[in-house]
Image (cartoon, helix red, strand yellow):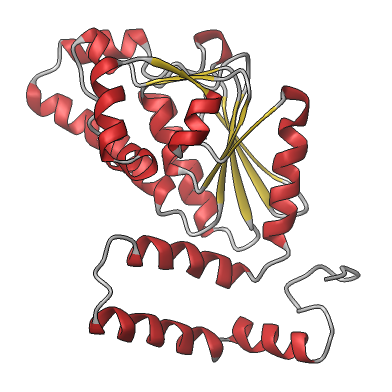
Amino acid sequence: MTEHVLYEVNEQGVARITLNRADKHNAFNEDMIAGLTASFEQAGNDPAVKVVVLASNGKNFSAGADLNWMQKMAGYTEAQNRADAMNLATMLHTLYTLPKPTIARVQGAAYAGAVGLIACCDIAIACKLSKFCLSEAKIGLVPATISPYVIEAMGKRIAKRYFMTAEVFTARRARRLGLISEAVSEDQLDATIEQLTDTLRHNSPEAVSQSKLLVNTVAGQPIDESMRALTSDWIARIRVSEQGQEGLNAFLQKRPPNWLPTGSKE
């Protein structure tokens, strides 16, 4: 990792990936993007990790792109800008496809690319006073690399409005639009996330991972014969898998499944 991104895993298997440029409002630069990509890959490949929480230090979640980084990009050629943008696109895709449940912990402001990070996470919990903005149009840009994830989270028509107007919107509106899952008071933020991580950790890790992949695979596809075959094959494969068998047998035998820590109760 880099000094701009912190990575830690606790005894419960919760990986916490933290944006660590509080003095710059956790604005992205090339070092942070590289650090985030490496952290997401590490969490995805570590069998000890059950849940990933994406957080940030300081008052604000993230201000988006770093001003010095943007100034440097302004002097790049189109080819150099394309390569630079691909690094950001790769980081976002790595987070979106990470085979573990991901939770964004949002405080303060989340602007521009930070909205993309939130949209890439499976669940997002924000403080009630958080503010959001897709601010790129104000400086003559467009939110291109984050657009697939933001459009999926908020919907096509809503995304058009906020891409074009660059309006600031509240956590309450962000929840109504689907960008965040819950808006809670600041003193309840960590407790709410801890409750979610505990709930996720008690489920079959393989079933949780497959559930995420299932949604990403099925969403937007026609409900036709090939879809019926795909989903039938999917559940058949899960039923005979190691954790599928263990979960069914544990349920029938009224005992905790073996993926729970020793001494845990269902």
Give the residue drawn at x 23%, y 20%: 164
Image coords of residue 11 (percent x, y) = 78, 52
Residue located farthest toward the right when viewing the structure as drawn: 263
Give the residue drawn at x 23%, y 15%: 137
Which is nearer the eye, 253 or 7? Answer: 253
Q: Vertically, is 223 above or below 134?
A: below
Residue located farthest toward the left when viewing the structure as drawn: 78
Q: Is residue 55 left or right of residue 26?
A: right
Q: Which quadrant of the rendered structure holds the C terminus?
A: bottom right
Image coords of residue 38 (percent x, y) = 45, 42
Q: Is residue 83 left or right of residue 256?
A: left
Q: Is residue 30 left or right of residue 182?
A: left
Image coords of residue 170 (percent x, y) = 51, 20
Give the residue drawn at x 35%, y 25%: 30
Q: Vertically, is 206 above or below 30?
A: below
Image coords of residue 91 (percent x, y) = 37, 40
